[in-house]
Amino acid sequence: MSHIRGKDTSIERMVRSFLFAEGLRFRKNDKRYPGHPDVVLPKYRTIIFVNGCFWHMHEGCPKATRVPKSNVEFWTAKLLRNHERDVRQRAELEADGWKVIVVWECELGKKVRDERLERLYREIVDDSGKADDSGE
């Protein structure tokens, strides 16, 4: 577990690579914002977190339900703290006028990756904080 990376993970690099190829320019791991977001797109007032399902307790995801069998109390407390911190940081960012998008690790599997990345691009560009909300 000590070799788990906190930033520049393979799924983060995949998302950033896609966004860059689509012509979007961004800042990465910006410490000025709560949670040090993985991607900050100031032009679109959008922040993206690329979360691992286990570490951030993705609800309803099979990858998030497996708590290690040893030291269960420690892991349960740690994962709950992570989840509560994520909720608090998202609320802070949204209160400051940022659009927050979370991309989950399970959404970047080979079968669904292209669809999710295209949807991410549309979420950023089509609804860039404008009042025109089509309900999609």
Image: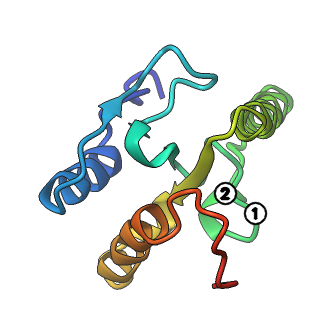
Q: Is residue 17 placed above or below 107 in the rendered structure?
A: above
Q: Look at label 2 and name its amino acid.
A: Ala
Residue drawn where x is 53% and y is 59% of the image:
104
Side (left or right) of 19 relative to 126: left
**Quadrant in the rendering for residue 121:** bottom left
Quadrant where the C terminus is found in the figure: bottom right
Dots 1 and 2: beta carbons under 8 Å? yes
On the image, numbered disc 2 is attached to which residue? 64
Q: For label 2, count other residues whose C-alpha is less than 10 Å away and answer few (under 14), some (14-19) or many (20+).
A: some
Side (left or right) of 28 relative to 32: left
Is 4 or 27 nearer to us in this picture?
A: 27
Mark 1 / mark 2, whichever is N-terminal: 1
Which dot marks residue 114? none
Residue extending furthest left? 21
What x and y, as percent, mark residue 1?
A: 48, 29
What x and y, as percent, mark residue 4?
A: 41, 30
What x and y, as percent, mark residue 40?
A: 42, 37
On the image, numbered disc 1 is attached to which residue? 59
Q: Is residue 21 placed above or below 111 in the rendered structure?
A: above
Regarding residue 63, the answer to whether it shows in the image is: yes
Q: Dot 1: what SS?
A: loop
Side (left or right) of 62 relative to 44: right
Residue drawn where x is 84% and y is 29% of the image:
77
What x and y, as percent, mark residue 64?
A: 66, 57
Q: Look at label 1 and name its amino acid.
A: Glu
Residue drawn where x is 68% and y is 58% of the image:
58
